[in-house]
Image (spheres, rainbow, N blue to C red):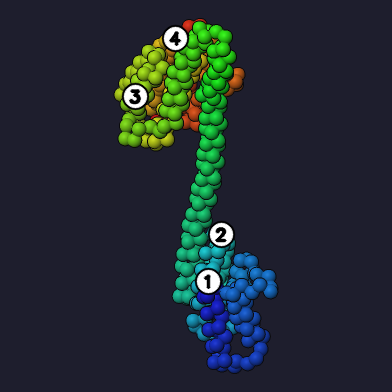
């Protein structure tokens, strides 16, 4: 548009001497001033303030009116109108374009009558308005997409930070504590070897048991960091997870699955698998259970999963949903966060000394 403005300004300035009665006058001064303005916008002169889009539109409108009324060249008003409408459509919102198009048509009607040029200006104005309206809609859509992307990036960063904190907490409460216990027991054995070999052997046997538990703990911890098997369905991945849990921990674990459709988004499957991993890890670590049952199925447009054990249960009794657990600040925080992020719900039932069950339902997109 800057180049078109410069071309139009200098074309009319060059044609002015050939107009009958041309002389040095205010008209010539106006053309020279407009040519300087056009050149300034092209090269963005830094020594003077750059005109705003509204000021430039007003100057272009004044130039169009000048061409329409004072220059007897047929092409000058038409080119000025085209430059004006194009500038308005590309740089301004559609209400302003409507005002410019209507004003231009009114000036043409008053100056030249309701001839072909008038109807041409009306058609050009309608086209410019339509273009501006489409541009505004695209800008609004782009703005919404950008805002959505910012929110998604913020949520993703929050999820990554929460995951890092969860991993750090699990490592601190699990493997790290076992390593510290391992070091303490070694110091005890070192002291006992000097005065009671039999007691030292008993401690050494207990240390071996601790090492086996540590190996199981580390395997479960590393496995919880692995993603879902590529190409495997959600049901088969859960089945292998439960089988591996039984082999690693010695806890009897069963899995049952109905007919389910995998979520269309892989991230949903990953989150569901991670929820089951954390549930099994918590059962092994805290419940003292000897039996675990995991099931998954489809009810309506929701995937439902359930994990129940015969361990010690939670330190509270009853059945509570996600909102109630968050209100009372009870239950596994990481699992609650993941379920909330998936737009699902959960029901946690606990009977202290008898066991607990966790039911999760997540909508299919």
- The residue drawn where x is 37% and y is 13% is 252
Q: Earlier in the sequence, mark 4 or mark 2?
A: 2
Residue located beneath label 2 in the image: 93
- Checking the image for residue 240, the label placed there is 3
- The residue drawn where x is 39% and y is 36% is 266
Q: Nearer the viewer, residue 242 or 360?
A: 242
- Checking the image for residue 310, the label placed there is 4
- The residue drawn where x is 63% and y is 92% is 23
- Label 1 and label 3: CA atoms lie apart by 64 Å
Badge 3: residue crowd in 10 Å (few <14, some 14–19, many ≥20): few
Q: Nearer the viewer, residue 9 or 48?
A: 48
Badge 1: residue crowd in 10 Å (few <14, some 14–19, many ≥20): some
Q: Nearer the viewer, residue 5 or 296?
A: 296
Residue contact between numbered discs 4 and 2, judged by CB atoms under 8 Å: no
- In the image, residue 135 lies at what x, y percent? 49, 58
- Label 2 and label 3: CA atoms lie apart by 58 Å
């Amino acid at each position: 548009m800057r180049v078109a403005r410069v071309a139009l300004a200098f074309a009319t300035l060059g044609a002015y001497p050939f107009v009958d009665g041309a002389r040095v006058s205010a008209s010539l001064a106006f053309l020279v001033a407009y040519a300087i303005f056009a050149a300034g916008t092209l090269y963005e002169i830094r020594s003077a303030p750059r005109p705003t889009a509204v000021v430039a539109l007003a100057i272009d409108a004044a130039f169009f009116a000048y061409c329409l009324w004072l220059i007897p060249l047929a092409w000058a008003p038409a080119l000025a109108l085209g430059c004006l409408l194009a500038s308005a459509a590309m740089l301004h919102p559609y209400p302003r374009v409507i005002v410019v198009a209507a004003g231009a048509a009114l000036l043409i009607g008053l100056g030249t009558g309701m001839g072909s040029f008038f109807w041409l200006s009306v058609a050009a104005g309608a086209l410019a308005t339509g273009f501006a309206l489409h541009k505004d809609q695209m800008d609004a859509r782009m703005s919404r997409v950008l805002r959505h992307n910012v929110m998604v990036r913020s949520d993703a960063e929050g999820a990554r930070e929460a995951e890092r904190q969860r991993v750090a907490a699990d490592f601190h409460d699990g493997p790290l504590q076992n390593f510290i216990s391992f070091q303490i027991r070694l110091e005890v054995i070192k002291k006992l070897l000097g005065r009671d070999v039999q007691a030292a052997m008993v401690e050494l046997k207990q240390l071996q048991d601790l090492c086996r538990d540590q190996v199981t703990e580390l395997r479960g911890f590393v496995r919880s960091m692995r993603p879902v098997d590529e190409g495997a369905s959600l049901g088969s991945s859960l089945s292998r997870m439960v089988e591996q849990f039984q082999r690693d921990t010695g806890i009897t674990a069963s899995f049952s699955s109905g007919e389910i459709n995998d979520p269309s988004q892989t991230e949903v499957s990953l989150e569901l698998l991670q929820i089951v991993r954390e549930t099994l890890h918590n059962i092994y670590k805290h419940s003292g259970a000897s039996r675990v049952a995991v099931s998954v199925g489809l009810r309506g447009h929701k995937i439902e999963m359930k994990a129940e054990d015969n361990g010690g249960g939670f330190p509270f009794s009853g059945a509570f949903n996600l909102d109630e657990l968050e209100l009372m600040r009870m239950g596994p925080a990481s699992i609650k966060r993941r379920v909330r992020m998936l737009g699902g719900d959960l029901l946690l039932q606990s009977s202290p000394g008898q066991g607990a069950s966790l039911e999760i339902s997540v909508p299919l997109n």
